[in-house]
Amino acid sequence: MSTRIDALVFWACSARIMWCFFYRPNRLPRSYVKWIMSLANVDKRLLRALRVLRTGEWSYIRGSSDYGHLLTSYSKDLGHPTAWGDPHVLPAYGGSMADAVWKNLGVQGRDGIGGLPCELVHAGVAAKWGLGESCGMNAVVRAVYAFIEAMAIYVPVHFLPILLTQPRSLLRIHRVIPALLSAMRSSAFLSTFVSSYWLSVCITRTLLFARLFPWISHDIWDGAFGCVLAGSLTCGASIWIENGHRRGEISLYVLPRALRASLPSRWIKGGNRGARIVERMIFILSLASLLTTASHRPDVLRGLSRWAFAFIMKKPRVDTGESNERQIAAYPPATESAIPEHAISSLLEH
């Protein structure tokens, strides 16, 4: 039950965080935004276009007087005609009119739908390897990139505790293989997170929904409640790939960021004294609770936090939750009597 709750918390938090990454990045820590940017591999001009599309300053229907250059320059840098990024030229709806526009622009693979060509959305990630511009290959290549980058993160996470506590065990293959498999599993989770987001975007705006409903404008499909929302709601399901006890740790990692992204802007500004006081009080109480638990009930802690607090407090071992019956049965330990048996016998005789 607890793992299901952990998965639900992660799903809700990741949906909020990813939506804010695209539209309200100021609500997230800068380091976190930078890390997501490195994994997402999205051009800043495309992100800017999505944000002004949400505000109505860039539109497939009305065009844009102030931001029309955003995607024209982006298209040119990718080696495509500038018209591919011009909102005054791109079709807002699907159907035969869209097909005529695509024929004039030389765009292939978007028969019956409008919106921005996939070549610009994918940013040529798969094309760099000569794999074409299909939505499926874009998701696969991004999954591989994310897996490699995730391995650089998770290998130290899984091996560092062993290196600090039992470095000699790394010479034993039966200890190395499980740790390596755990790192690969965590990397697969993050890789699926990234690729599922991109695949959901393509399913919404290109592969399925935009084709089923061609009369709906791509201001909707490419807007805040279209492909971006679909990706944000889908990617969190990848948490089920991760190990059960790790789900709770990851959920607790993203929860503060999701809460911060949901608070009013005036609360999270640096000059808000009341918010700083509340934040510090929460930190003090949380740390005190963890230290108390690590001292008296270490068995209720999980994963990395359990090991970290045991290491900090220099406990020789972390209790594995042995039952009280076994503890009582093993206490007191059997020891030899300090008085010789012949001395006891002589005392009894007298």
Image (cartoon, rainbow, N blue to C red):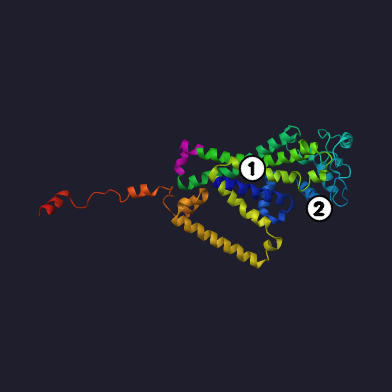
Main SS class of the magenta portion in the image: helix
Residue 274 higher or lower than 140, as above or below: below
Tag 1: amino acid: Ala
Identify which residue, 223 or 66, lies in the foreground.
223
Q: Is residue 41 visible?
A: no
Task: Where is residue 176? Give x, y as percent.
Answer: 50, 38
Identify the residue under disc 2.
55
Tag 2: amino acid: Thr
Could you say which quadrant of the image residue 238 lies in? Answer: top right
Residue 253 marker: none
Residue 293 higher or lower than 137, as above or below: below
Task: Where is residue 53? Give x, y as percent.
Answer: 81, 49
Name the mark nearer the viewer: 2 or 1: 1
Which residue in the rendered view is the most extreme toward the left? 350
Binning the other alpha carbons within 10 Å of mark 1 as few (below 14), some (14 to 19) or many (20 upward) gives: some
Residue 237 marker: 1
Q: Is residue 69 visible?
A: yes
Residue in the picture at 60% in, 41% down: 240
Residue 168 shown in magenta = yes
Q: Are marks 2 and 1 in contact (CB under 8 Å)?
A: no
